[in-house]
């Protein structure tokens, strides 16, 4: 059990509460990221499912309107431990854009909603692990993005092919 006094990120620099269990799951993700992507992350998967289920068409349109700003923001991410994160976020932004513009008619709404949730999560200023934490600051964003890519691989790989994007450059296996 984490005491209230220790329930802040690292050495007290970040005064907001941290979900200790989520941090452990994400630290496992960082440590074992070279293992096959089938490692269980049930709590994070449930979190992504819940978040994606709350994406309404109105929220999706709002994300679509903010895509130019989000794309620029994502290019500024410096995460050497997660070298594919920026490309993956850009790909998911393109998925949302194509869906909102009607260019991805065969893409299920849940896939577009999950991509939108990943973009929203990556944009959030307060997330499970503060981005400023060395080495693991972007582990949570990477985990959310990887879950979306894994769970919607069939549809996203097909859409990547339509878009002329090499799926092997986007997928977690890259």
Image (cartoon, grey):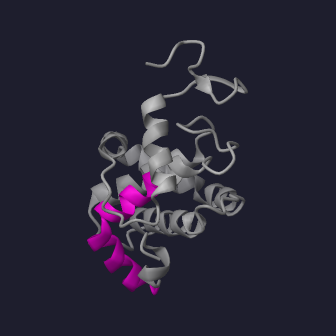
Q: Is residue 51 left or right of residue 169?
A: left
Query: Can the viewer see residue 105?
Result: no
User: Quick check: is 27 in the magenta stretch?
Assistant: no
Query: Can the viewer see residue 123?
Result: yes
Quadrant location of the N terminus in the rendered image: top left
**Camera-side residue of 16 and 66:** 16
x then y, percent, for residue 95? 44, 67
Kindly indicate the quadrant of the structure image that contains residue 48: top left
**Camera-side residue of 143 and 95:** 143
Magenta residues span 143-164
User: Taken as a whole, is the magenta stretch helix, strand or loop?
Assistant: helix
* Residue occupying the point 32% across, 57% down: 39
Q: Is residue 17 above or below residue 174?
A: above
Q: In this view, does 65 lie above or below 49?
A: below
* Residue occupying the point 51% across, 67% down: 88
Q: In this view, does 92 lie above or below 122?
A: below
Q: Is residue 20 left or right of residue 72?
A: left
* Residue occupying the point 56% across, 70% down: 87
User: Quick check: is 160 in the magenta stretch?
Assistant: yes
């Amino acid at each position: 059990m984490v005491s209230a006094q220790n329930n802040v990120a690292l050495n007290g620099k970040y005064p907001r509460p941290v979900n200790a269990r989520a941090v452990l799951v994400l630290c496992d993700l960082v440590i074992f990221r070279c293992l096959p992507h089938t490692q269980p992350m049930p709590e994070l998967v449930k979190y992504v499912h819940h978040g994606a289920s709350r994406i309404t068409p109105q929220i999706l349109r709002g994300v679509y309107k903010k895509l130019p700003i989000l794309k620029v923001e994502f290019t500024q991410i410096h995460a050497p431990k997660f070298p594919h994160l920026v490309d993956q976020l850009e790909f998911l932004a393109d998925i949302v854009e194509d869906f909102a513009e009607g260019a991805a008619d065969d893409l299920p709404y849940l896939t577009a909603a999950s991509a939108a949730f990943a973009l929203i999560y990556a944009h959030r200023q307060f997330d499970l692990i503060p981005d400023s934490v060395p080495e693991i600051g972007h582990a949570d964003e990477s985990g959310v993005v990887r879950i979306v890519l894994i769970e919607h691989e069939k549809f996203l790989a097909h859409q990547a092919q339509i878009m002329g994007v090499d799926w092997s450059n986007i997928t977690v296996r890259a």
